[in-house]
Image: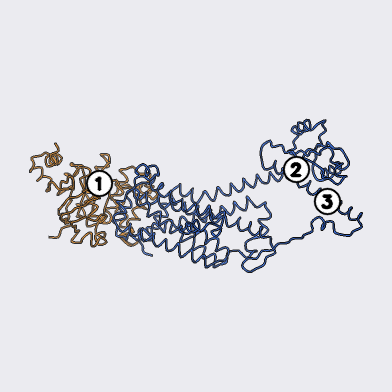
Chain colours: A blue, B orange
Amino acid sequence: MSNSLLNLIVKEIKELVRDPKILLGVILMPLLIFPIMGSAISISQKSVEKALISASFAVYDEDGGPAAEALLSFLEANNTVIPIDAPALEDALRAFQETDASSLLYIRDGYSENVSRGLKGRVKLYANLRSLTIAETGSTEVINSLLNVYGYYFSLARIRQLLTEAGESADPDAVRSPLSISYASVIKGNVLEVHPQAIFGLIMSQSIMLPIMMMIMLMFAIQMAATSIAIEKEQKTLETLMTLPVGRMTILTGKLAGSIVVAVAGAAAYMVGFGYYMNSAFGFAPEMTSMSLGDAGLGLQPLGFLLLGIVIFVTLVSGLALAISLAVFTDNVRSAQSLTGFLTIPVIIPAIILMFTDLEMLPPAVRWALLVIPYTHSIVASKAAFLGNYAVVAGSIAYITAFTVAVLYTAARIFSTERVITARIRSFSLRELLHKR
Amino acid sequence: MEYAIEARGLVKSFGNVLALNGCSFTVGEGEVFGLIGPNGAGKTTTLRIVGTILKPTSGSVEVFDVDVVRSPDEVREMISYLPEEAGAYQNLSGDEYLRFMAGFYTDSGGEKEMVEEGERISGLGERLRDRVKGYSKGMKRRLLLARALMVKPRLAILDEPTSGLDVVHAYHVRRMIKDYVKEHGVTVLLSSHNMLEVEFLCDQVVLINEGTIVAEGRPDELKGRYGAENLEQVFMEVTRLE
């Protein structure tokens, strides 16, 4: 590396890292904010869990028969029950609102009679939504689950009794649910004894991070590079650089390389912060931690990891080159930022669409429109790297690289002419464009 | 005779705007040469063409017999350019800025000497350890001028070197230029709309208005020719703006 290039890269990194906005926004923010967010979610989830465990519910037994009493005994054995004694439902509801319970189980009159006659016993659940929190709905879910469990065992006992009366021998559970269904998933030729929904949930929970990460990293990088060029133009330091005994391509490369170093540091900080966030915020959910992508044969292999690195690198270079090429047409930071703001559209759209769906599921016109955008390939390639579809990754890298070469060529052309100094877009807003038109 | 600058029939247009309309002048080696004129006269465009930033629409410029369009890299080895109202990198210290700039002209051996020269010229002392963002306008200008001169260029191109500075800083900057030229014999091409400054600094001047040279000569000679007390009166006389 030539001295001049190294000199430019070191200067660029110092300038960017010492800028409090960049230091805070790109590096410190992800390292601080994500863990704080994660801890906050974790604390609130734990308090919800605690609230659910200690949840109590009220019961208004209008029936008073033996079947209702059996149900009540079951509930009392499994949770704290507040019995409500009232002449009518309206009074019971009023009394219920004065208790701490967030749910009321109303056992209607005739419940025991219905049950004894082989009909459905009718009950009703009232949820008191005082503060509209997750804990309140959770408490209704708790009593609902208890009722389902009670219903299940009650039906098994009844089936057993009927079978005995009929003189037949059979498994009451098999009579109740005659089909036993098990699931397996076939991935990359391997049969895994795992429910496809679990695999899908796992991939979604981890692959959803990629589009988000790619989007945020690119947007940071684009804004950073555009601002950096605009400051150089505003301060006329670029004009000075153009008269130094150093090649224009060296200046451009120095700018790109410096921005890439900072953007990669930002991406690393983001990954660390986001990883901590995912662990602390969702660590309580056992289904997410019981299996990793590696267990499912979907983890990043060394080649996939290398290719993913290349994808991130070429994506960053293309975004930075595009931002720099556009920012040279502005003469101040504000107009550079509004101009590059438009660049975030092709970054955000594929990220959002591919977060929820796959390219193959889209109508052909939309799919091809998305495929023209290089940043679609960044996300497609990231997912493919996880799934081990290296041909797709290589194709995407080739496309992004071709796009990057075209943009770099344009940037180099602009840098080698006087347009780098004379080009002017004073402001860039849709309103003004429409007004001009 | 080898000229430091030889400009012939310079024309420069930006779209429909004609910034320079056939300017020709020569600058002798070791001279301090001033371009005088109002805002928009074409001074900065001329300096940018000599500084290899812009290309003339027609005409030519040679710096020490090297064509600025055909061999810009060779020209950049000989010149040092200070744009009007330029800034420095806000998050670098004054010292770091000088070291950064010296890195393009010399290896690590000569860098120390060059930076020390820059520190001496700037006269900013301990303030060079501070970040540029804390500098006043005058301090920034002194740092930038020190940067332009510390590399000992054969030709220094200074666009409005004292523009927007208070009396004290403007005086200091003029002294920096005058002393440096006396000490090292470099050629200086500067632009200014401050006629008194030009009289103080320049051996030779051209008066430029609306892209055309309207008069040229030594300051005393021009004053004598138009019976004026100073260059301001000369300018008003030749452009008949009065």
User: What is the secondary structure assignment of the residue under circle 2?
Assistant: loop
Q: Name the kind of residue labelled 1 in the image.
A: Pro
At a point 33% along the width and 62% down the height, the residue shown is B109
The type of residue carrying mark 2 is Ser
Chain under disc 1: B
**Most foreground residue, A53 or B220:** A53
Judging by the rendered image, the residue that carries numbered circle 1 is B161
* Rendering quarter of residue A79: top right
For disc 2, the chain is: A
Residues flagged by tags 1 and 2 on a common chain: no
Q: What residue would you read off at disc 2?
A: A54
Q: Kindly report the distance in space between the C-alpha atoms of the residues bearing marks 3 and 2.
A: 24 Å
Residue at label 3? A153
For disc 2, the neighbor class at 10 Å (few under 14, some 14 to 19, many from 20) is few
Alpha carbon separation for disc pair 1 and 3:
94 Å
Picture quadrant where residue B193 is located: top left
Tell me how far mark 1 sits from mark 2, CA to CA.
78 Å
Residue A274 falls left or right of residue B214: right
Q: Chain of mark 3?
A: A
Q: Are marks 3 and 2 on the same chain?
A: yes
Give the quadrant of the C terminus of chain B: top left
Location of residue A81 in the rendering, given as x and y in whole percent from the top left corner: 80, 40
Horizontal relation, residue B203 to residue A195: left or right = left
